[in-house]
Image (cartoon, rainbow, N blue to C red):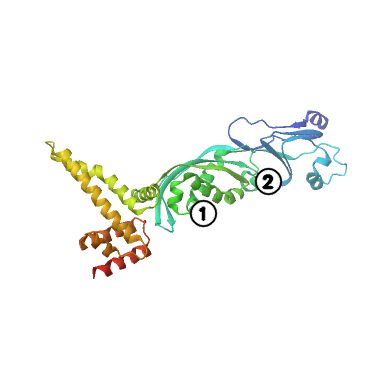
Amino acid sequence: MALMDFLKKQFIDVLQWTEDGDGTLAWRYPMRDMEIQNGGQLVVRESQMAMFVNEGQVADVFGAGTHKLVTQNLPLLTNLKHWDKLFESPFKSDVYFFSTRQQLDQKWGTPQPITIRDAEFGAVRLRAFGNYAWRIVDPRLFYTEVSGTRESYLVGDIEGQLRGLVLQNISNAIAASGVAFLDLAANQTMFAAALAKQLEPEFAKLGLKVEQVTVQNLSLPEDLQKVLDQKIGMGMVGGDMGKFMQYQTAQAIPEMAKGVGAGGDGGGLAGAGLGMGAGVAMGQILAQNMQSALQPGAAPAAAAAEAGVKPEDVMALLEKLGELKTKGILTEEEFSAKKAELLKKLV
């Protein structure tokens, strides 16, 4: 009976794995009572790595290529087994294959708005979604920390954990980047790079590497989006306050014309022309006053008096400065300095 059992034994002379496209990350070669033949071959393809585990202890790891299983090619396993016959007989050892190709188009997104801290705006709530790609780079660490002795381990088994890491590190990425949130929001590529950098050490703990992170959409609260639009408008006019006020006036003219034009009987068009003319004139006066107020050492009220502007106009200018401070265009220090100058001129 023992002889028959011996004859029925299968001696493995070629170990290899061809992925079947089901998202398998790790696969244990089916050994059972089979033994690996001395001098057999281990075939590892370009997108794979293989690892030998002896009695629960990780031994040798092999990269792409065809490897002959002899003592010289299995130094760690040879030391663990203490072969006194220089590896002349068949041996048993668990063999795991790992897929090292990129796992592409892995989705991430915020199911609910998340709150982040920003040095400029304090607490900000946002929604975001995109995708990312990663791969296994350290099979030994992935085996000991994630897949273990399971017969197979799939992408779906770890997908939720990785997505959670992405969401958890969004606020940390913004803080660690040292870049203002508005700048990150206006440049999604920069945002994605900051997030990828933050994720690298977290994925490395699992034997993984982040290959790419993309941000496909970033939704901001309406009030913060308005501030971002103002910032973009300032960029369009090169930071010139006078041109910026003219830009704002031009944006308001269509709404002003709509209101004036509601009279009908042909008066709408003439009224619209009046409204547009008044709006442009008002914008130019306010732009001149704003430009004077923001220049160091200028006397805003005196300049306003020379232009024939009443003290009420100076108060309107002060209110406008307050609005710009609220929107984040002026800092608290800038606003306080200009406010003091204006109030001194009104005394």
Earlier sequence position, callout 2 versus callout 1: 2
Q: Is residue 298 visible?
A: yes
Distance in Å between CA atoms under marks 2 and 1: 31 Å
Q: Quadrant of the N terminus?
A: top right
276 sits to left or right of 58: left
Q: Nearer the viewer, mark 2 or mark 1?
A: 1
Q: Position of residue 324 (x, y in %)?
A: 32, 56
Q: Which numbered tag is attached to residue 177? A: 1
Looking at the picture, which amino acid does disc 2 mark? Answer: Arg
- Seen at 75% across and 40% down, the residue is 93
Front-lying residue, 129 or 9: 129
Looking at the picture, which amino acid does disc 1 mark? Answer: Ser
29 sits to left or right of 221: right
Hey, which residue is sitting farthest front in the picture? 306
SS type, badge 1: helix
SS type, badge 2: helix
Q: Which residue is mark 2?
A: 140
